[in-house]
Amino acid sequence: MAVISRLESVLGELRARGGRVTTPRRAILQALIDHADHPTAAQLTTRVQALLPDVHESTVYRFLEDLEGLGVIDHVHLGHGPAVYHFVDDAHHHLVCESCDAVIEVPNQMFETLRRRLHTEFGFALKPRHFAVPGQCQNCAAARR
Amino acid sequence: MAVISRLESVLGELRARGGRVTTPRRAILQALIDHADHPTAAQLTTRVQALLPDVHESTVYRFLEDLEGLGVIDHVHLGHGPAVYHFVDDAHHHLVCESCDAVIEVPNQMFETLRRRLHTEFGFALKPRHFAVPGQCQNCAAARR
DNA sequence: GTAAGTGCAAATGATTTGCAGATGT
DNA sequence: ACATCTGCAAATCATTTGCACTTAC
């Protein structure tokens, strides 16, 4: 049986929903897949433009929005800068250091107790996706700042 | 013995650090105290301008920054809009509904277990201040959206 | 052929900054 | 007097939108 790449699988889903597969979209999605960590729209644009110089940032934003609607990706605001994007199935949360901007990834499971309590006590459904937890990392805390 | 209001206490601290107490600053701080919930810079500006129409938004932003430096207030980004400001001693966190933007306040103590685990396992010091937890509130979850 | 997608330029919203004049200490 | 604040206008940064043209289906 054929193995379908993430790229083709998402594009298939897109097409199934009446969307169109274009050269810019292919490149944006590929950039998203290639970018191991958490790229911003600007970073993706730069990467795409290495191949297709005319692709505009607005096209990237629009397609990212579409992918979000498709439930394929999500975006988070870590710290103060621009939002970062990630695939939804890549489930973990982020500890963001307010002193040095370091980002520490922690597994979702770490939030399991909290998730359960929020649900039983407040009926609140914690999204099983990234969210930013502000604080101070070990180094910065040690450095007393 | 005299009871010193929050207003005077903060202004005293400000003066002690070489800052100057001006009419706009007094009004901004008062607006912050009067605003029970979590005002944005724009809301504070509007409130201040009711009394002092010439106070500019940039003055508000600059003073809020100063107050943050003084450790008196903090700001959080709930959802997507502008940042909201709050006194640091008013310790609680926020559940933000992604469907209806409702904000539910939960006591810090709810995060105690998480805080401890993050500290022992990652050396990460969760800030004892507001942070935004994205998810879906009871109503919206029930409404299947 | 037609609706959906694209590039471009211009609008938006939040926040920041440079500067010359006003004000607190 | 002197540094700090202030108002104002303009800059910046991330993101969105309107529109005429192009392209996938």
Image (tube, coloured by chain):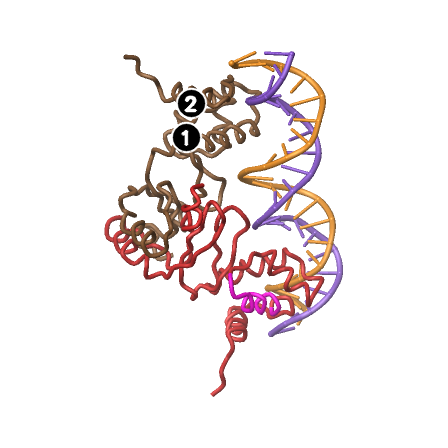
Chain colours: A brown, B red, C purple, D orange
Asked if marks 2 and 1 touch (Cβ < 8 Å), the reply is yes
Callout 1, which amino acid?
Answer: Val
Q: Badge 1 local density, few (<14 within 10 Å), some, or many (20+)?
A: some
| Visible residue check, residue A123 | yes
Residue B42 percent across, percent down from the top left: 61, 56
What predominant SS class does the magenta segment belong to? helix
* Residue lying furthest front: B143
Helix, strand or loop for disc 1: loop
Helix, strand or loop for disc 2: helix
Are tags 2 and 1 found on a single chain?
A: yes
Left or right? Give the position of A19 relative to B119. right
Q: Read off the chain for label 1.
A: A
Magenta residue check for A22? no
Q: Residue at x 40, y 61 (%)?
A: B92
Left or right? Give the position of B25 relative to A48. right
* Residue highlighted by disc 2: A13
Residue A1 percent across, percent down from the top left: 27, 12
Q: Earlier in the sequence, mark 2 or mark 1?
A: 2
Of the pair A29 and A123, the residue shown nearer to us: A123
Q: Which span is picked out in magenta? A: B26-37
Residue B21 percent across, percent down from the top left: 60, 70
Q: Is residue A119 above or below residue B86?
A: above
Q: CA distance from mark 2 to mark 1?
A: 10 Å
Q: Is residue B120 above or below residue A77?
A: below
Figure quadrant of residue B11: bottom right
Q: Residue at x 68, y 68 (%)?
A: B51
| Visible residue check, residue B135 | no
Q: Read off the chain for label 2.
A: A
Q: Is residue A86 above or below residue B39?
A: above
Callout 2, which amino acid?
Answer: Glu
